[in-house]
Image: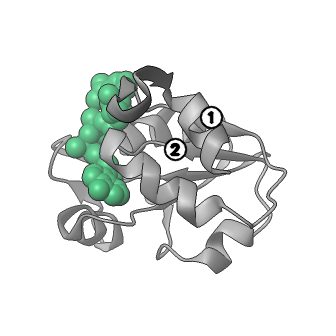
Amino acid sequence: MTKILIIGGGAMGSAFSIPCLENKNKVTITEPYSKVFKKNLSSKNKFHSALKIKLSKKLRYKKFSQELLLEKFDLIVIALSLSGIDFIGKELKNLKIKTPILVLTKGLKYEKKINKIFTISELLKKKI
Ligand SMILES: NC(=O)c1ccc[n+]([C@@H]2O[C@H](COP(=O)([O-])OP(=O)(O)OC[C@H]3O[C@@H](n4cnc5c(N)ncnc54)[C@H](O)[C@@H]3O)[C@@H](O)[C@H]2O)c1
């Protein structure tokens, strides 16, 4: 059984938990930003207001913290929107985590000062 941590309880992160659980993995989800998603995921019936479905009771919700990032996981999934990438980069910096990271965030970031376009992975590598 693979231990997976999903960071970001929005539509993508929460939907991604479904196939992960169906494939018998142990899945924890955390939400660092949105009060609505925090409430959805920590509620008893786990009704997700964006997906309009009840998520599995097997999905564990944990409060976002540095301690959580340091727990032993086999895979960390980042499902934040582009505006959350700087935030998670800063949080992961200095933690020296060796766990593989899967990034679901789409898009490219244009850094005007240096006139360069970065992929999300490049942005994260730059931060971490
Ligand atoms: N929805 C899809 O079908 C789909 C498919 C593939 C990829 N994606 C990508 O996944 C990412 C998330 O999309 P979504 O549909 O879940 O969006 P969403 O709005 O439902 O969720 C956004 C997530 O990002 C977090 N977030 C937003 N601003 C933040 C900030 N400033 N700091 C920290 N966290 C912040 C939110 O709290 C939430 O967890 C996007 O990059 C999207 O392109 C979405």
Q: Which residue is mark 1?
A: 102
Q: Which residue is mark 2?
A: 78
Q: Identify the colour scheme used.
A: one colour
Q: In screen coordinates, is 87 left or right of 94? A: left
Q: Decide: is 73 above or below 109.
A: below
Disc 1 C-beta below 8 A from ligand 1: no
> Quick check: can you spot residue 55?
no
Distance CA(mark 1)–CA(mark 2)? 6 Å
Q: Secondary structure at mark 1?
A: strand
> Quick check: can you spot residue 48?
yes
Residue 67: give x, y in percent of width and height: 66, 79
Viewer-proximal residue, 47 or 33?
A: 33
Residue 123: give x, y in percent of width and height: 54, 37
**Residue flagged by tag 2: what amino acid is it?**
Ile
Disc 2 C-beta below 8 A from ligand 1: no
Classify residue 20 by image quadrant: top right
Q: State yes or no: discs 1 and 2 in contact (Cβ < 8 Å).
A: yes
Q: Please give the count of numbered marks on the rendered protein.
A: 2
Q: Decide: is 123 above or below 75.
A: above
Q: Decide: is 97 above or below 18.
A: below
Identify the residue at horizontal 41%, vertical 43% (top origin).
13
Q: Secondary structure at mark 2?
A: strand
Q: In screen coordinates, is 80 left or right of 60? A: left
Viewer-proximal residue, 33 or 112?
A: 112
